Image (spheres, rainbow, N blue to C red):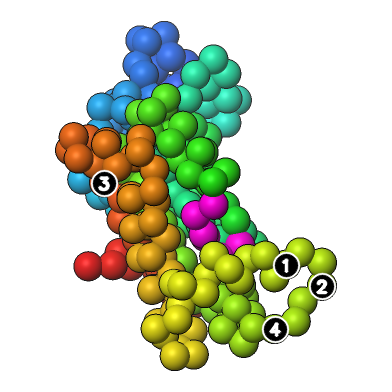
């Protein structure tokens, strides 16, 4: 098990062994052989993501010991992320870190307010249609500045207010409650994505893809999926 190994040389030899054995993917955190990530089902992908978040919350990060040089080398020609995540641009949400993942594992799209725009749809469609991700998590977070600003309809410089139009329909029913608005927005954007993308809608219908929403708690580090 990688966790019981100590020393750079030992880790390198372990990873080199995996590479030599032609093992696809890069999962080694739990002492298991690496998996081809795209073989995960939707439910397995979501479970993997949440299990990683539980390790993060518990302070048991296991992705750090992975050899980044080898991971980079193994992913130069292809990527096989097991899941896509749409998250806010907020600096307090380093997506890979909070799910205890590293290079090549998560196909991440980020924009303030984790909203679905045509460019975001295009990115996530690429994740599903080309890379084969079986699950998409749309993730809001507590204390989201974009949502707070939209609720208050704050006057903001430049083009920042462009964000509001994407958030207003989602948060209209929250009556100023930011925590509720964050959850409503994530659910709304997930629904919008599921319905507005022909690629993703078909993948859902065919049973190959799940789109879920959730929220990240800045204080606890925990991600809670919406029911
Ligand atoms: Zn935010």
Q: Determine the CA span between mark 2 and mark 3.
A: 37 Å
Position above or below: 136 against 190: above
Residue 154: which disc? 4
Is label 4 in a helix, a strand or a loop?
A: loop
- Asked if disc 4 is less than 8 Å from ligand 1, the answer is no
Question: How many C-alpha atoms fall within 10 Å of the one at disc 1: few (<14), some, or many (≥20)?
Answer: few
Q: Which residue is mark 1?
A: 160
Q: Position of residue 9 (x, y in %)?
A: 54, 24
Q: Which residues are magenta?
A: 112-117
Closer mark to the observer between disc 2 and disc 3: 2
Spatial distance from mark 3 to mark 1, Cα to Cα?
31 Å
Disc 3: which residue: 210
Q: Residue furthest right?
A: 158
Question: Mark 4 and mark 2: span between their CA atoms?
Answer: 10 Å
Can you tell which quarter of the image residue 22 is in?
top left
How far, Cα to Cα, is label 1 from label 2? 6 Å
Towards the viewer: 75 or 172: 172
Residue 9 or residue 165, whichever sits in front: 165
**Residue 80: percent from left, percent from top:** 41, 27
């Amino acid at each position: 098990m990688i966790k019981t190994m100590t020393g750079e040389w030992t880790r390198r030899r372990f990873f080199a062994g995996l590479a030599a054995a032609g093992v696809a993917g890069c999962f080694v955190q739990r002492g298991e052989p690496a998996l081809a990530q795209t073989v995960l089902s939707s439910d397995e992908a979501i479970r993997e993501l949440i299990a990683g978040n539980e390790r993060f919350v518990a302070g048991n990060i296991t992705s750090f010991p992975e050899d980044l040089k080898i991971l980079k080398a193994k992913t130069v020609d292809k990527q096989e992320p097991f899941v896509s995540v749409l998250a806010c641009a907020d600096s307090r949400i380093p997506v890979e870190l909070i799910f205890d993942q590293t290079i090549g594992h998560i196909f991440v799209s980020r924009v303030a307010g984790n909203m679905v725009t045509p460019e975001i749809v295009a990115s996530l469609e690429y994740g599903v249609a080309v890379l084969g991700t079986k699950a998409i998590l749309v993730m809001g977070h507590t204390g989201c500045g974009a949502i707070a600003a939209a609720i208050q309809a704050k006057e903001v410089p430049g083009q920042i207010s462009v964000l509001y139009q994407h958030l207003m329909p989602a948060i209209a029913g929250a009556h100023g409650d930011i925590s509720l608005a964050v959850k409503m927005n994530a659910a709304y954007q997930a629904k919008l994505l599921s319905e507005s993308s022909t690629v993703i809608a078909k993948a859902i219908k065919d049973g190959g893809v799940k789109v879920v929403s959730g929220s990240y708690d800045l204080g606890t580090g925990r991600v809670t999926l919406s029911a």
